[in-house]
Image (spheres, coloured by chain):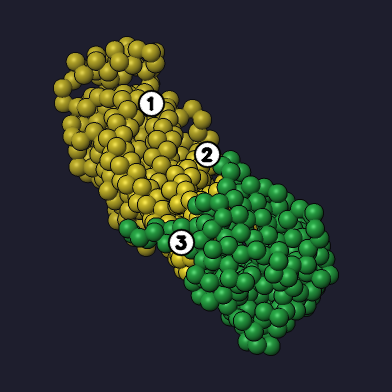
Amino acid sequence: MTWFYLAFKNLIRRPTRSLLTILGVAIAIAVLYSLFEFQKGYQSRLKGELGALGAHVMVVPKGCPYEAATIALHGGKWPRYMDEGLLAKVKANPGVAEAAGVIMDAVFAEGNENVILLGIDRDYMGLRPAWRINGSWFRSDSSVIMGSTAAQEAGVKPGDIWVVPEKNVPLRVAGVLGRTNAQDDGFVFLPRKTLQRISGLEGKLVVILIKARQVDKTADLVASLKASEVDMNVFPLSELLGTIGQLMASTRVFVSAIILIAVILGGVGVLNTVLMAVFERTREIGMMKAMGGSRPDVFKLVWAETILTTVAGGVTGVAIALVSSRLVETIIRGMIPYAPRGSLIGLSLPTLVACVLLSLTLGLVAGFYPAFRAASVKPVEAIKAG
Amino acid sequence: MTGAIQESGGSTAKGQEGVVEAHGLTRAYRRGAEQIHALKGIDLGIQPGEFVGIVGHSGAGKTTLLNLVGLMDRPTEGRLTVLGYDVARRGVRLDALRRRNIGFVFQEFYLMPSLTALENVLLPRMWGGGNGLKGRARELLERVGLAHRMTHRPGELSGGEMQRVAVARSLVNNPRLLLADEPTGNLDTKTRDDIFYLLADLNRGSGLTVVVATHDLGLESRFSRVIRLEDGNVVG
């Protein structure tokens, strides 16, 4: 028989109380795990999405830069446009290696599926050197290249006819992209002029993506582009990452405070429960001492009970966080202006270990006083108290 | 004030070291402003292998005396030596002495409800840091007639069976002195006799020194020697 076996047996004597205490800790740990993982997943996914853009600088119409970033990254309909003539000016800048003008639109297919349309030109390939097209580049103004997921959902292959939803414009599928594991998989690419025509946006662009000639001189490039044109937002993607990161960091302080309070409350709950149990078991503890249990023995037993409770709470909390990750993500996504696609809360061993270590520390701290009280019980007084 | 116990029918060998030696043993408690003397300077001696009954009415000082002899308390005044150790001396680790040398049986059985009979018997081993010894625990349960109840939990045992488990538990550390405080107080007459025979058998069979506190005057004749307490004094 071991200390932890005995502690476990003591805990299951009052299953409801033990379970409620474990649940209190579990909720605190679940919140901690979810928010921590969300922030980590957010940063990592955002970096991935920005990297997949293949550009260093983004030029968008005047307006909210986060909204613009969302459109540029995820595609969509944004009622702000730039004149297509800007593209030539941008390309003329000596600091620009590659530049691609993009027009975007979004339509609803059957089943209310949102289909993102991107109007691009050959220059877009300068930003996508890794693209593998099954089929060919646009053969005519009436052709289309489908992202792998988009083609799968539409059930088309090269050579098939695909009709643009809402617009009822038939286009021939020239090619289907090999899987990129990025946002391109879900897009449908049309010749820029074609999309401008069918969407009634002739001569308009939503974003210009730029690859700098020298990455270390991106700041100079941004400055010179800003100087040359006032009617657009120019920002390096690293700045976008930093700005969104700062936005998240500012909420982190508030969120951390909430987590801290939740963890403290969980700890106080544990302390209260264990202390109550010690008071109720005064005679039993006295008996243990009568049978030869020393102060350290009794201290260890009560401490072990507390640690078991909090560690069980920690493990349960992580399990709750993983099971409810979809729900939590949906709630958080609804509260913040921009969130990358894909699952942000996942199983992470370092975070799991950190949460279990925190719950262990919580047990060590919360269990100290009850264990001290139990260890201080005098057998004679305890037995007399009965 | 004092009682000359040796003269009251002890079955001890002269010159042998006593298991318990007490001189002028006093234990006083403070209750508010009042000082209560539970034991009033008693003298007594208990020799190895004795089966001693401490008899008296409620409040006579039986439990106080048992607590002192059982190293759960220290005297206010007087000298007390248990198994050769001066209990009144500071620095003596009473819990360690108790664990190694003394077994307890109480009126309440104090069995852990979530542990089996066998695990309850093994419990005191854990305090000593010694694990295992399942064989000895099984042997003890067989000895108290519970070979068929080893895996049962206290809730599945009768009062007499629970007290038998408590007796087996008190013996697992192989004590030199067994103290029982009203061990039959919660039991019916038949079960009371069974437990009593068990304690007497332990005394006879292995020479274990057994001290039983009881208010049941009908049990007096079963002890090898009786110490009568009244109002904190030995009276016979």
Amino acid under disc 3: His
Tag 2 secondary structure: helix
Residue B37: mark in rendering: 3
- Classify residue A275 by image quadrant: bottom left
* Residue A143 shows up from this direction: no
Rendered image: mark on residue A55: 1
Read off the chain for label 3.
B
Disc 1 crowd, CA 10 A, few/some/many (<14, 14-19, 20+): many
Residue at left offset 78%, top offset 63%: B12
Q: In this rendering, which labeled residue sits more in front, label 3 or label 2? A: 3
Picture quadrant of residue A253: top left
Question: Does label 1 or label 2 sit earlier along the sequence?
Answer: 1
Callout 3: SS: strand
Instruction: In this rendered view, identify the residue nearer to me: B203 or A19.
Output: B203
Q: Is residue A337 left or right of residue A29?
A: left
Mark 1 vs mark 2: in front: 2
